[in-house]
Image (cartoon, helix red, strand yellow):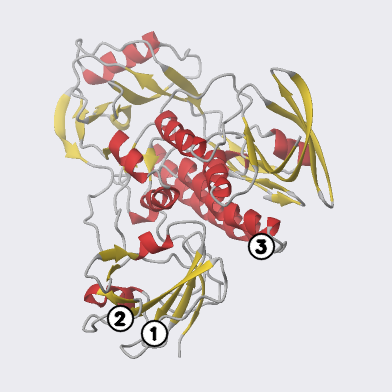
Amino acid sequence: MTSQVLIAGAGPTGLTLAIDLARRGVDVRIVERATEFFAGSRGDGIQPRTLEVFEDLGVLDAIHAAGIPVPLTRMFLDGNPVGERRMSEVREPTPAVPYPNPWMLGQSDTEAILRARLAEFGVQVELSTALATFTQDDTGVSAVLEGPGGSETVRADYLVGADGGRSTVRKTLGIAFEGTTDESIRMLLGDVPVQALDLDYGYWFAAAQEPMNGIALTPLAGRHLFQFAAPLAQDAEPTRAVLQDALDRVSGRTDLVVGEPEWSTVWRPNIRLAQRFRDGRVFLAGDAAHAHPPTGGQGLNTGVQDGYNLGWKLAAALDGDITAPDTYESERRAVAAQVLGLSSALLDKHISGTDDAMDRGEDTHQLDITYRATNATGRLVAGDRAPDAPLRRADGSTVRLFELFRGPHATLLDFGDETDSAAAPTDPDTRTYLLVGPDTTPRDGQLVAIGSHAFTEYAADTGTRVLIRPDGYLAWRNDK
């Protein structure tokens, strides 16, 4: 059996990549060694940049409907209330940033929404199907899959390992997973019901003498559950009784009855980065390429960005531009290293108990991620994220730049004046739009930049032309 792209691993990374490929007409196959779909919260924080990706992929409405904003957390020391706080300050939308705040949704629910979207393109995740081994040559990859029907040899143009921290793909390639694992720190994570707590709030219970060594409980949208995070002693078993004893001790209450965990795991600081993200026709993405601590909510989001960056490049390679994927490793490995540094710094703050250890700023939102050259200068240059902005059509209706970007195409923005007319695109995979100033009456396909926001955000003058990549970053700009 043949396919153009074989994806090993059906978490958020693999699903994002599969959707992006499928909507481009690429023949994609996605396999998952697990016998059933993951059923836990794990990566429950969706960052603003990921929300923008989800809008482009057509799942944002479902994500918004299923999730909740970052909840207000009630803080208790020795059982006494000491205040309320949010990990992330609430920010108002702007013309350039329509989704400025993180969104909370359990990972299993996010994955279910992505699977439903993928199914709309006729692609289903194949459970109980493990990638056993593979070889590659100049024209493709030959892989052996072990599934319910036994062994199967398949052929693909490209293979992507989105198969997690224990990645078979990475190990088969012999790529080093560089970094550290701190066995001295153990934390119990999971999803539990807790009686007597209001699900509209998060909670932090700790002893006054050790304010950072407490238990966090975060409500899970639509689940009547809390995601808990609690320190776990070296000799302790990850059980409900252990969590109940710890909660009783730090809360000073007896009415907080913990139910059986619906999902749980023991986490240790495991901070790693693959030495390479590519070997010929084989790529690594998501947790197979980088392992993050949960501080900062970066892991799932970075994996989604990997898939979003790689999808259009693989499609271009299959369409004849074999150099398109060459930038994947250089762009995404640099970002992963940067994000790992951020997550590690936040973890260090938490361990040392600094006052702002629980605060999350804009540096965690992934809106400032850029692929610009190290020597590039300017407010908005090639490699930077393309901002949103409101526009008005000739018929008076409005549209956002992100709506024009939506889909598998590239977008050329031509900042003109009232005498210009929209030019036909020279590339069939590129859509061209002529933007004019706010005092112009639009004609001939012109779009008015409401409030001149598009001109301002793109630092554009009359005659500026900007090409936006399919993944929403600037490919190039030309200022006359």
Residue at screen point 30% across, 88% down? 418
Q: According to the image, label 3 marks what residue?
A: 324
Distance from Cα at disc 1 to Cα at disc 2? 8 Å
Question: What secondary structure is found at the residue carrying circle 3?
Answer: loop
Q: Nearer the viewer, mark 2 or mark 3?
A: 2
Of mark 2 and mark 3, the one earlier in the sequence is 3
Find out whether the residues at labels 1 and 3 contact each other: C-beta distance under 8 Å: no
Q: Percent position (x, y) of residue 363?
A: 38, 55
Question: Image check: 144 left or right of 395?
Answer: right
Q: Percent position (x, y) of residue 408?
A: 51, 57
Q: Nearer the viewer, mark 1 or mark 3?
A: 1
Residue at screen point 20% across, 30% down? 201
Label annotation for residue 14: none
Q: According to the image, label 2 marks what residue?
A: 443
Find out whether the residues at labels 1 and 2 contact each other: C-beta distance under 8 Å: yes
Of mark 1 and mark 2, the one earlier in the sequence is 1
Kind of residue at badge 1: Ser
Above or below — where is 474 with respect to 107? Answer: below
Q: According to the image, label 1 marks what residue?
A: 421
Q: Percent position (x, y) of residue 75?
A: 20, 32
Kind of residue at badge 2: Arg
Distance from Cα at disc 2 to Cα at disc 3? 36 Å
On the image, which quarter does residue 109 sit in?
A: top left
Nearer to us in this view, 179 or 131: 131
Residue 353 appearing in the image? no
